[in-house]
Amino acid sequence: MKSVPQSFRFSWIHLWIFQLLLLLPAPASSQQFAANEFTVGATLQTFGWIDCEAIGNGPACNPVTVHSVYVPIPSFTYTRNLSPSVALEGTIQPTSDFVRTDGFDSGREALALGGIKSGWRGQRWGLYGKFQAGVASFSCAVSSYSGNTTSGYTENCSRLTDFAMEYGGVVEYHKTPRYAFRLDAGHLEIAEFDQIFSRYTDGAVMQYRAGGILQHADLRIGVTRSFGHLETATPDRAPARQNWDAGVTFALQPRI
């Protein structure tokens, strides 16, 4: 029997912790909140690629994973507050540095995610768990070469879009009822499928890119501005009992 990858087990541990945050009791004291919030921030995101580490002075080498971090890149988050402790969110990261995610250049990353944020909020501080799903798109992830030795070779570059999900936590400090500082820490997973770039005349594969689950750590720091009418809420410590519960589950399952 094949073992389950460590990253896959960690994913379910994080999702289990997120479910516990949903059960945290709401504060009994009254608080002000608006239905709409917009956050402008900067993101630090890790990425890695496969490199080759030389063995002695010979031509042989061992594959190694090299890790690095983007310089701060812009991110924008819209929050629709359903209550002081539950909200729907959408996050957009429009561009990034030109990066490599494995042995190939991948170009600039655009990220679009949407999901739920839920947890606890006091007068000044808020602590939440979040889960979002969406797409990650790389501007130059599919590349191949065409031409010949006489005219020269040209690199052909096209965009590749993959499914993605992110889970993590959020800490907020509400300076005023309208402004807050926000810190997000999350784990981004991108499901990249096998890609065939070119074939020989007999149909055999010439250039290809192997798929996998790309792992990224995200850290976002931003300033939040609320819009709309400020409501004053005094949440109950325990919600009213309901006969039915409904929910949605989204998972990326690695090939084992």
Image (cartoon, rainbow, N blue to C red):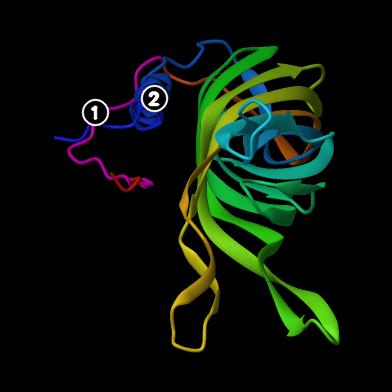
Furthest toward the left, the residue is 1
Q: Residues within 10 Å of mark 2 (few under 14, many from 20)?
A: few
- The answer to whether 105 is drawn above or below residue 179 in the figure is below
Q: Nearer the viewer, residue 87 or 196?
A: 196
Q: How many marks?
A: 2
**Of helix, strand and loop, which mostly describes the magenta segment?**
loop
Furthest toward the front, the residue is 58
Residue 96 appears in view? yes
Q: Which percent across, then down, holds residue 116?
A: 50, 40
Residue 217 appears in view? no
Quadrant in the picture for residue 75: top right
- Tell me the number on the disc at residue 241: 1
Q: Secondary structure at mark 2?
A: helix
- Residue at 36 percent of width and 26 percent of height: 6
Structural distance between the alpha carbons of marks 1 and 2: 32 Å
Q: Nearer the viewer, residue 195 or 13?
A: 195
- Residue at 58 percent of width and 32 percent of height: 64
Q: Magenta segment: does it hold 152? A: no
Q: Amino acid at mark 2?
A: Phe
Q: Is there CB contact under 8 Å for labels 1 and 2? A: no
Q: Amino acid at mark 1?
A: Arg
Q: Nearer the viewer, residue 183 or 234?
A: 183
Quadrant in the picture for residue 121: top right
Horizontally, is 158 left or right of 70 in the view?
Answer: left
Which quadrant holds the C terminus? Answer: top left
- Residue at 71 percent of width and 23 percent of height: 183
**What range of the chain is rendered magenta?**
237-252
Q: Which residue is mark 2?
A: 10
Q: Which percent across, then down, holds residue 73?
A: 83, 40
Horizontally, is 103 left or right of 226 in the view?
Answer: left
Which of pointers 1 and 2 indicates the residue nearer the eye? Answer: 2
